[in-house]
Image (cartoon, rainbow, N blue to C red):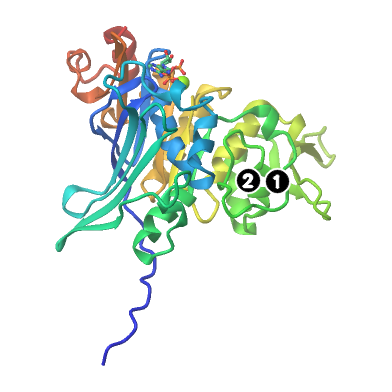
Amino acid sequence: MPTNPRPRASSKLPPLSALTVRGFKAVRDSGAVPLRPFNVLIGRNGSGKSTLIEALQWIDTALRSTVPGAFDRFRGLPHLLHVGAEGRVKGMEIELRWGEAARATTYRVEVRHPGRVDLSLGEWLETTSKTGAQRQINAPAAPDLLALARDRSAATAPAREFWANAVFLRLSPAQLGGGATPFRGSLEPILDEEGRQLARLLKSLSPAQVARLVERVVELVPGMRGLVVNDPGEGMELHYSLIEELPREAGKRARRHEVPAWMLSEGTRRIVAILALLECSPAPSLLCIEEIENGLDPWVVQRIVQHLRAASSQGVQVIVTTHSPWLLDDVPLDDILYVERAGGETQYKRFADMDAVRAFSPYVPPGTRYVQGLS
Ligand SMILES: Nc1ncnc2c1ncn2[C@@H]1O[C@H](COP(=O)(O)OP(=O)(O)OP(=O)(O)O)[C@@H](O)[C@H]1O
Ligand SMILES: [Mg+2]
């Protein structure tokens, strides 16, 4: 007897295995940039590190708002298109692959800018399995909207879930010290780029998650003993504070006091934000952090990288950009991508495969190889 097929429960996609970007800002054609669960992008100023993350973020924004909305950050499509693009019809392409060839899912978005007409969109989502390629989406829903954002089928659920839980950070201590709005909109990310909504994220944690977070924060910022989120209610802004313990002379009990977010050190605010993202549920599917070492002391950077690497082995894919050679010393060579811009062409190279890196003895740490071999 035929039965109504029930929508399959959404199965999680494996980590992104490759990203290809064409015609986007610094990139004419990146080729398939290999991605791993944990990735560090390093290279000179202006080489194209942020460009790779911005390509992912472009899709994220287009899905959460509209295609024109995703161009706002760049003040319009014409600025975003790679200046070296040739031919009458200019355009950009971003293609992602999750998993490996035999069981890969690919998602590709193309935006063409023919000139007279504003823009034209192409969008494909395909899964390869034993039974061959299955196409879920092959056309945009409406001129300004990506089809993936509007699709409700079970087949596209894993890709939609991936994007719903992607997080892009360029943390701003000023925003991290501000108040959060109490309710999260359905299209808002787990945490916004600058970290304004951190207090709301903290409020969503369970007591066990808060306890683990505090344990990790205390390890990096000694003296901190707890965390409280102040919710005045009635739609008013949420704020968070850390509880600090000050020792007193022998025989007297230590004094505890609340330090509001805006009075915390800037590094402490960043630490709380990054570690909170590693506790929350659902966890981020993809966590991109720009210049991760900003405002953090070397010991904190080392520990945060350890936490991020551990999370990446549990399903949180991590991409960070850095200018810190020391940070490289704490990650395997295979996790490093070297970004180079020569003659206006941006290239993403596996650090471990580069002759200038391999020329060193295996005992020379990656940071030293970077500074001395790739200037
Ligand atoms: N439309 C475009 N076409 C070609 N190149 C562009 C375009 N827009 C921007 N660029 C170039 O891309 C460069 C790379 O920018 P990107 O932000 O990716 O560098 P980065 O590696 O993150 O550098 P930093 O370490 O300074 O943050 C810019 O400095 C700019 O010169
Ligand atoms: Mg940058």
Can residue 209 be spotted in the picture? yes
Query: Residue placed at 30% from the left, 48% from the top?
Result: 124
SS for callout 2: helix
Query: Residue placed at 25% from the left, 55% from the top?
Result: 127
- Quarter of the image that includes the C terminus: top left
SS for callout 1: strand
Give the residue at the far bottom of this rendering. 1
Q: Is residue 255 above or below residue 25?
A: below
Q: Residues within 10 Å of mark 1 (few under 14, many from 20)?
A: some
Left or right: residue 245 compared with residue 214: right
Pick whichever, 1 or 205, lies toward us: 1
Give the mark nearer the N terminus: 1 vs 2.
2
Whether pointer 1 and pointer 2 mark residues with C-beta atoms closer than 8 Å, the reply is yes
Residue behind label 1 places its C-beta within 8 angstroms of ligand 2: no
Pick whichever, 143 or 361, lies toward us: 143
Pick whichever, 64 or 248, lies toward us: 64
How far apart are the alpha carbons under marks 1 and 2?
6 Å
Q: Residues within 10 Å of mark 2 (few under 14, many from 20)?
A: many
Residue hosting label 2: 214
Instruction: Please tell me how many numbered marks the rendered image carries.
Output: 2
Q: Position of residue 264 (x, y in %)?
A: 72, 31
Query: What amino acid is at disc 2?
Result: Val
Residue hosting label 1: 226
Q: Position of residue 341 (x, y in %)?
A: 32, 13
Query: What amino acid is at disc 1?
Result: Gly
Q: Position of residue 372 (x, y in %)?
A: 30, 7
